[in-house]
Image: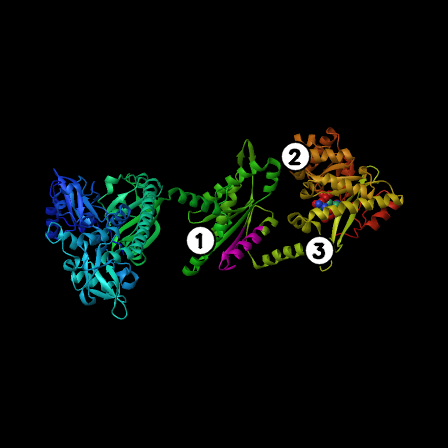
Amino acid sequence: MFSDVTIERIIHPEILSCSSATPLFQAVQRMVDAHYSSILVVDDGAAVGIWTEQDALALDFSDPTFFSTPISSVMSSPVKTIYHKISIGEATLHFREEGVRHFLVVDDEGAHKGIITQSDIVLNQGLEYFISMREVKAVLNKSHLCLSGQTPLHDAVKAMRNTPADALLVEGENGSYGILTERDVLRLIGSNRTSLPIGKLANFPLLSVSSKSSLFHARKVFTENRVRHLGVTGENGELIGLVTFSDILQNIEYDYVHSLQMALREREQSLAVSTQNLRLAEKVFETTFDGIMITGPRNVIESVNPAFTVITGFQARDVIGRTPTILASGRHDSEFYRAMWAEIGEKGYWQGEVWNRRKNGEIYPEWLAINVIRDSTGKVSNYVAIFSDITERKAAESHVRHLAHHDALTDLPNRILFVERLNHAIVHAHRVEQKVAVMFLDLDRFKRINDTLGHTMGDRLLQTVGQRLAACMREDDTVARMGGDEFTVLIENVTDPGSLPSLAQKIIAELSRPVVLDGHELVVTTSIGISIYPDDSDQSDALIKHADAAMYLAKEKGRNNFQFFTSEMNAHAFERMTMETWLRKALERQEFALHYQPQVDIGSHRIVGMEALLRWNQPDVGMIPPVQFIPVAEDTGLIVPIGEWVLLEACSQNKAWQDEGLPHLRVAVNMSGRQFRQKNLVEVISSILKKTGLEPECLELEITESIAMVNADETVTKLHALKAMGIRISMDDFGTGHSSLSYLKQFPIDTLKIDKSFVQDLTRDSTDNTIAAAIAAMARGLKMKIITEGVETEEQLTCLKGMQQGDVQGYYFSHPLPPGEFAALLRGGQPLGEMTPDAGKA
Ligand SMILES: Nc1nc2c(ncn2[C@@H]2O[C@H](COP(=O)(O)O[C@H]3[C@@H](O)[C@H](n4cnc5c(=O)[nH]c(N)nc54)O[C@@H]3COP(=O)(O)O)[C@@H](O)[C@H]2O)c(=O)[nH]1
């Protein structure tokens, strides 16, 4: 509604002026001739005052000589000025604030540009909005001056001045009306008619409009008739008042000014906001870490920000006026850019990853967003490209991806990546009708190395194995570490499965070469299982499982060899799973029992102790030997509750026999590795002894060398705690493991138990003879007792007697017996030496 047009567009450039000495009547004459409502009083080029037609009312018309006085005596001074560049709206407010009807318009230098009146402003502001909806009666001035036509002019002028009014109604003859305005008064100055009554000077007839007419209509009548006053008639055509052009202006002025102020305020606010936004945008442009490049509609670079230079190395002067192709890396083909621009054209924006080239030639990835900017007509004015260098992010992503798909220790692909590649290989092999082989490798007895030499050494060994394994394979093959000491190999494009055995042999040979770590020469062998797609399965997980099952068979067949998967192996795996399920229920279903094997004095053959041996009578399949279920119990952790049960049962049975009056003997209980590593082992045993009432001296714990060597320091502490309670400790299977003699010295061991493997060939094999004799000598040296297990024949016994071994145990004296039979043996009190049937033998 309100334009920003400046007042210089609507002012009257011609200024009517006179000097300050000009007689008033001359100045008035010039105003009347020129149809001007004001005259500027100028002396030496400077505006010293202004005189307007309104000022005429202030004159004394009763004294005609007064009109000869210089204009300087009646002019208004100083002259109010207004700047030529301000808007019409702002000028309106100035008129209101200053309370004047004329302003002298000046430029920057103060030169006079013209005169502007309040009417000029309002007439140029488009009043239709305000005046079309109102009627004349809304602005009607009912208290108008109305004088008789006989009234002298000077009285009439005085009345107009005092009211104040810029016009008055003059009663004519026959009830007619005329009008006398301040402009009419002006014209009379200096004339010889000022002595006439106003009936002779007024304009007849009075132009009128109905009070119901719109102000819009009234303005039309004003402008068409070039008058500024109209009579207003009532419903019956009677004159009810006067309306002036300024009445209309004044009436709408409030609304007009209010709206104008609102509009100006809004404009100021939005200007403030946009200025603020602009400042903010400039700040962002300058300080953001994102590169910004602004191009024109033809994609010519117009500006870039400092971050652009940091990222690309190009200064603004290098690129302004060029197109963004200066940054192209050559990594994207024309189709890429075509699709990008198509999307920008369609959606107005695009974002994605782009490879660009820095000034130094380096290619780097960036995340780029391009937005189209359009002008108010909808035409593209600019493209704004915002980008960030994502080199580091991509490197981090790739590192994370690598970590997620690789084993941290060996940096080989892990299970996830292996399965991914295997799936991919299966799909490919299916297409080209070829085979794929999966090898599953498990290091033989790796746990012992880990246990005896520590995890750091174990880890280093695994790294070496990984490297050697990878070196055996082609580049296309995948070598992965599945966890622990398990590795897998994926061999693609197998045209001849007959070549796999030699490859497996090559791996076995390569891995069994000694590894020297910190002066330790380690020899590690491996067992390999092989499965083939599509012969064994077309599913990746099944192929891995089958290779795993085949590997187990390789282990069972003596380790350090390979086996191909056969369907029977599935049954083996199934057995293991079934056993695991059964084992979980065995304790609560009370399927376990203990058998006792006597330990006898080598000289007297009298029973000096017994070993408690676990038996499992599974309801569906009958007796399951410990060698089958103990490893499963170990793997699953079930050995801990089962072992506790064994201890409790052995102690309470021994106590029961003692309470019955049978000799106080010691009972030896086998400890599994997992059970021994229990943190609260000492507390558990102590509470069992307390609960059963058995003297600690009547309990012997059998630990193996490998148990002892794991966390040797912790083992020493535990063993001392058990020893302090009075419990005896024996080292089982002695001679088969990796014992460290220096450690052995520190362990509070009571008895060394020579493994039965050394006894079997005792009579024939001179080496075993020597070993058994050496162990016996060492035990004596370490002040330990000795017991030899697995004595089956008289010859073996004779041989052992020749070495003066301590106690002996074996089928020669008795098989492990159920409690009832063992009690009978005790009650008999006879020396043993003849074969007795092992009623409960597994
Ligand atoms: N952690 C636990 N391990 C246990 C427990 N009970 C047994 N076991 C271990 O299981 C392995 C096999 O035990 P088993 O089948 O009971 O065999 C024992 C004897 O029957 C056998 N033996 C005894 N005399 C002879 C013999 O003259 N010849 C011969 N060939 N075998 C004989 O030896 C086994 C006892 O061995 P050891 O423990 O080394 O003294 C075995 O490793 C048991 O340790 C249990 O409760 N917990």
Camera-nearest label, 2 or 3: 3
Determine which residue is flagged by label 1. 492
Task: Give the image location of residue 1, x and y in percent.
Answer: 27, 56
Task: Give the image location of residue 715, x and y in percent.
Answer: 68, 35
For label 1, the SS is strand
Which quadrant of the structure image shows residue 581? Answer: bottom right
Most extreme residue toward the top is 781
Magenta span of residues: 529-551
Q: CA distance from mark 2 to mark 3?
A: 34 Å
Q: CA distance from mark 2 to mark 1?
A: 45 Å
Task: Give the image location of residue 560, x and y in percent.
Answer: 56, 45
Image mark for residue 712: 2
For the residues bearing labels 2 and 3, Cβ distance under 8 angstroms: no
Determine which residue is flagged by label 3. 585
Q: Amino acid at mark 2?
A: Ala
Magenta run includes residue 697: no
Most extreme residue toward the right is 661
